[in-house]
Image (spheres, grey):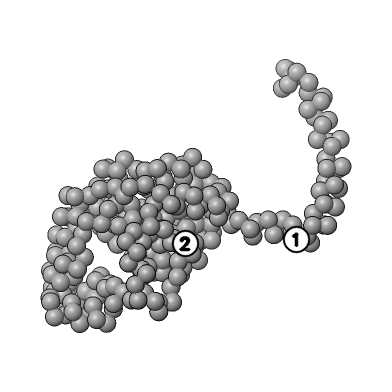
């Protein structure tokens, strides 16, 4: 049989001879420094193994005029009433779920129409490709959760050349802000939710979903709209806030132990 190395004896004996002295030294060292050196070390930087992204307005440039869409679905008067009750944002899918099947079907047609127009103008968000390249280099998994339809996700994958897996669309129920889709991705990856970060441009959908699941959250606020008074009294707060995707890279490196 051929030896595995030209000096098999040396290779084998080295750890046996040096291990006890190394171990005792490090124990003394750690005990003097802190009673819980390892726990302290892991608390300083949390481990991050996966990032889950929202699609519209996060991985793609926002092109859907949501105000016009809501007006078309709800009618002017109803839109104004609901908007006044929900200054931080309207949950249109939630509103139409209470409607009669006929009215609901018509509403979905209007929404789909707006979404299709958005797809025609679909553009990848600046910084998205670079961020994904960085995540890949660290072997960090990336997933996607959207309230848009599967057709839109497929087109996004095709046009951007990036793949997110799992990618859950609104066919997966319940959708955001319910934590179910994020928990589903965590269990698919076999990761704990606190080893995952949810990144999105919506406080009420993405950050709430992430928080409820027990994940880290990062709000993408390109235009600083979340600095307005409308959001002053909300009890949801993201762990991190960025104004562009290109900031996420350094945020991850500074705050996390990146282990894929
Ligand atoms: Mg969004």
**Left or right of residue 13: residue 173:** left
Check the image and report above or below for 189 versus 73: above
Task: Estimate the x, y position of residue 168 in percent, counting from the top left.
Answer: 35, 56
Q: Nearer the viewer, mark 1 or mark 2?
A: 2
In this view, the residue in front, 86 or 11, is 86
**Left or right of residue 3: residue 257:** left
Say whether residue 203 is visible. Answer: yes
Q: Is mark 2 within 8 Å of ligand 1?
A: no
Check the image and report above or below for 28 versus 87: above
Task: Estimate the x, y position of residue 15 in percent, counting from the top left.
Answer: 80, 35
Identify the residue at image location x=28%, y=78%. Answer: 86
Give the class, few, some or many, for how many residues have Cα within 10 Å of label 1's Cα (few <14, many ≥20): few
Q: Under tag 1, what secondary structure?
A: loop
Task: Estimate the x, y position of residue 146 in percent, counting from the top left.
Answer: 32, 59
Identify the residue at image location x=83%, y=57%. Answer: 32
User: Looking at the rendering, which quadrant does residue 129 occupy?
Assistant: top left
Check the image and report above or below for 59 versus 18: below
User: Looking at the rendering, which quadrant does residue 220 occupy?
Assistant: bottom left
Q: What's the mark number on residue 18? A: none
Task: Estimate the x, y position of residue 45 in percent, counting from the top left.
Answer: 60, 56
Give the class, few, some or many, for how many residues have Cα within 10 Å of label 2's Cα (few <14, many ≥20): some
**Mark 1 / mark 2, whichever is N-terminal:** 1
Q: Which residue is mark 1?
A: 36
Identify the residue at image location x=14%, y=65%. Answer: 110
Identify the residue at image location x=38%, y=57%. Answer: 243
In this view, the residue in front, 44 or 96, is 44
Q: Which residue is mark 2?
A: 240
Check the image and report above or below for 19 versus 177: above
In this view, the residue in front, 167 or 33, is 33
Q: Under tag 2, what secondary structure?
A: strand
């Amino acid at each position: 049989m051929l030896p595995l190395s030209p000096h098999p004896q040396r290779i084998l004996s080295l750890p046996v001879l040096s291990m006890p002295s190394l171990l005792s030294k490090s124990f003394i060292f750690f005990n003097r420094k802190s009673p819980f050196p390892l726990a302290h070390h892991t608390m300083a930087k949390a481990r991050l193994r996966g990032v889950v992204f929202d699609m519209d307005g996060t991985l793609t440039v926002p092109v859907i005029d949501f105000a016009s869409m809501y007006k078309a679905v709800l009618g002017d008067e109803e839109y104004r009433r609901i908007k006044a009750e929900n200054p931080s944002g309207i949950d249109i899918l939630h509103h139409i779920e209470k409607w009669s099947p006929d009215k609901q079907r018509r509403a979905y047609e209007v929404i789909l129409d707006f979404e299709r127009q958005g797809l025609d103008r679909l553009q990848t968000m600046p910084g998205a490709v670079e961020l994904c390249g960085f995540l890949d280099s660290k072997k960090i998994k990336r997933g996607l959760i959207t309230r848009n339809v599967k057709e839109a996700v497929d087109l996004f994958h095709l046009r951007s050349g990036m793949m997110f897996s799992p990618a859950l669309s609104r066919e997966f129920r319940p959708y955001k802000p319910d934590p179910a889709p994020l928990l589903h991705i965590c269990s698919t990856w076999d990761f704990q939710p606190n080893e995952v970060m949810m990144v999105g441009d919506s406080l009420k959908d993405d950050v709430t979903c992430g928080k409820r699941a027990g994940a880290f959250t990062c709000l993408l606020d390109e235009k600083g709209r979340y600095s307005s008074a409308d959001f002053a009294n909300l009890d949801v707060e993201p762990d991190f806030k960025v104004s562009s995707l290109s900031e996420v890279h350094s945020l991850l490196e500074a705050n996390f132990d990146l282990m894929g």
